[in-house]
């Protein structure tokens, strides 16, 4: 099984579903913040939910390989929304 989790596997429909999925997550995130849940708690819960689902679909080895690339992606700013001058 491929360890690449890319939208290309699902074509144009996959991109539409990816955007819809993100909208659902962001809406739920906003609702939780409004209810007083701390962002750090939400982030930890979201990571846990995401990893458990990915492992269920792709298996532990594939997810371990995918997550091993996260430090490089983080350092390259892939997940940084607002840049700060240092």
Image (tube, rainbow, N blue to C red):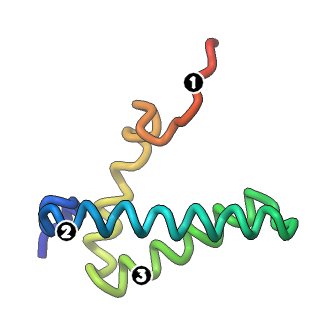
Q: Is residue 11 left or right of residue 33?
A: left
Question: Depth-wise, is mark 3 or mark 1 nearer the camera?
Answer: 1
Q: Is residue 22 left or right of residue 85?
A: left
Q: How many marks?
A: 3
Percent from the top left, x then y, of residue 14?
A: 22, 67
* Image quadrant where one finds the C terminus: top right
Percent from the top left, x then y, of residue 72?
A: 38, 39
- Under circle 1, the secondary element is loop
Name which of mark 2 and mark 3 comes first in the sequence: 2
Question: Depth-wise, is mark 2 or mark 3 nearer the camera?
Answer: 2
Residue furthest out toward the top: 86
* Circles 2 and 3 in contact, beta carbons < 8 Å: no
**Dot 2 corresponds to which residue?**
13
Question: Depth-wise, is mark 1 or mark 2 nearer the camera?
Answer: 2
Q: CA distance from mark 1 to mark 2?
A: 31 Å
Q: Nearer the viewer, residue 37 or 48?
A: 37
The label number, if any, that marks residue 83 in the structure image: 1
Percent from the top left, x then y, of residue 6?
A: 21, 59
Q: Residue at x 19, y 68 (%)?
A: 13
Q: Residue at x 35, y 66 (%)?
A: 64
**Dot 3 corresponds to which residue?**
53
């Amino acid at each position: 099984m491929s360890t690449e989790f890319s939208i290309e596997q699902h074509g144009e429909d996959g991109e539409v579903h990816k955007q819809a999925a993100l909208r659902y997550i962001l809406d739920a995130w906003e609702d939780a913040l409004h209810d007083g849940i701390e962002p750090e708690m939400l982030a930890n819960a979201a990571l846990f939910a995401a990893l458990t689902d990915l492992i269920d679909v792709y298996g532990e080895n594939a997810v371990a390989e995918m997550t091993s690339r996260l430090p490089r992606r983080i350092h390259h700013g892939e997940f940084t929304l607002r840049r700060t001058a240092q």
